[in-house]
Image (cartoon, rainbow, N blue to C red):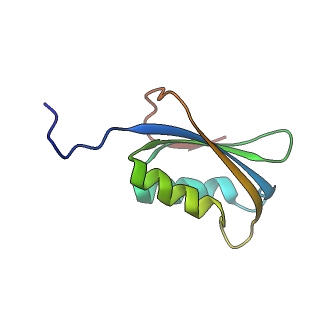
Amino acid sequence: MSGLHDTPRQCRRFLVWGKVQGVWFRESTRREAERLGLAGSATNLADGSVEVVAAGTQADLLALANWLRCGPPTARVDQVTEEMIEDPGIKGFSTF
């Protein structure tokens, strides 16, 4: 039974461009997402970007979005796009 203060789970897909591969971006993203209590994945794409899919509360997704705009110290983030997607019911956080 849901309480009045339950926050619905949302899911977002982020694409991150810049120097984001080979700089521990995915692992750092996993750690930040887990710290925020988010489920999802971070995947290197062939074009050099990283795709991040994350599910959780709106507030936690906003915190992740803000973190992604800077990333870990070894990264250089040039651009981040974000879109809401259907929640596939993912659990945990993985990197590929």
Q: In which quadrant will I find the N terminus? A: top left
Q: Looking at the image, is 65 positioned above or below residue 49?
A: below
Of residue 69 and residue 33, the one placed in the foreground of this image is 69
Of residue 59 and residue 37, the one placed in the foreground of this image is 59
Q: Residue at x 58, y 63 (%)?
A: 67
Residue 46 image point, x, y percent: 84, 38
Q: Residue furthest bottom?
A: 73
Residue 61 image point, x, y percent: 48, 51
Q: Residue at x 15, y 42 (%)?
A: 4
Residue 20 image point, x, y percent: 77, 57
Q: Residue at x 66, y 68 (%)?
A: 72
Q: Is residue 25 visible?
A: yes
Q: Is residue 28 visible?
A: no
- On the picture, is 20 further left or further right than 62? right
Q: Residue at x 50, y 27 (%)?
A: 86
Kindly indicate the quadrant of the structure image that contains residue 43.
top right
Q: In which quadrant will I find the C terminus? A: top right
